[in-house]
Amino acid sequence: MAQTQPMQQDAAIAAFGALAQPTRLQLYRLLVPLGARGMSAGNIAERLGVAPSSLSFHLTSLVEAGLITQKRVGRQLFYAVAPATIGELRKYLADLAR
């Protein structure tokens, strides 16, 4: 089994920074229970009560930080959590405590 590289400080800071904003944290928490199936951008906007232009900005931040993925299905964009990144963040924090 190949060993993965530990998360670098810059990647951890980017992920924590992306989550350190109320709308993005709420968005991430909305997606976690949905797993890989995710949710369409339109449904996310409706559930969170966020304007599409503002939502796009927040989604981009989370995608760039590697916390969520984006997939096109027909004309819709679906977003889902990237569970490996949160696992890496947990390990990063645990390694700091050693």
Image (tube, rainbow, N blue to C red):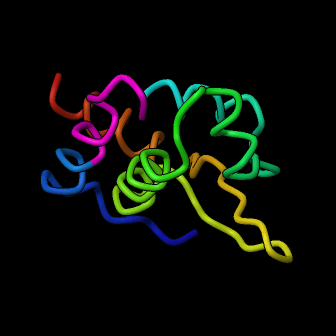
At 82% across and 50% down in the image, what residue appears? 37
Between 16 and 57, the one lying in front of the other is 57
**Above or below for 73 versus 55:** below
Quarter of the figure with the N terminus: bottom right
- Residue 84 is situated, as x and y percent measured from the top left of the image, at 53, 51
Between 23 and 34, the one lying in front of the other is 23
Left or right for 68, reference 5: right
- Residue 11 is situated, as x and y percent measured from the top left of the image, at 23, 56
Q: Is 19 a magenta residue?
A: yes
The residue stretch that appears in magenta: 15-24
Left or right for 53, reference 20: right
Between 90 and 65, the one lying in front of the other is 65
- Residue 94 is situated, as x and y percent measured from the top left of the image, at 28, 28
Specify the quadrant of the image occupied by residue 60: bottom left
At 50% across and 24% down in the image, what residue appears? 26
**Above or below for 13 versus 10:** above
**Above or below for 79 versus 72:** above
Quarter of the figure with the C terminus: top left
Magenta stretch prevailing secondary structure: helix
At 40% across and 46% down in the image, what residue appears? 88
Specify the quadrant of the image occupied by residue 15: top left
Q: How many marks?
A: 0
Left or right for 57, reference 14: right
At 53% across and 53% down in the image, what residue appears? 68
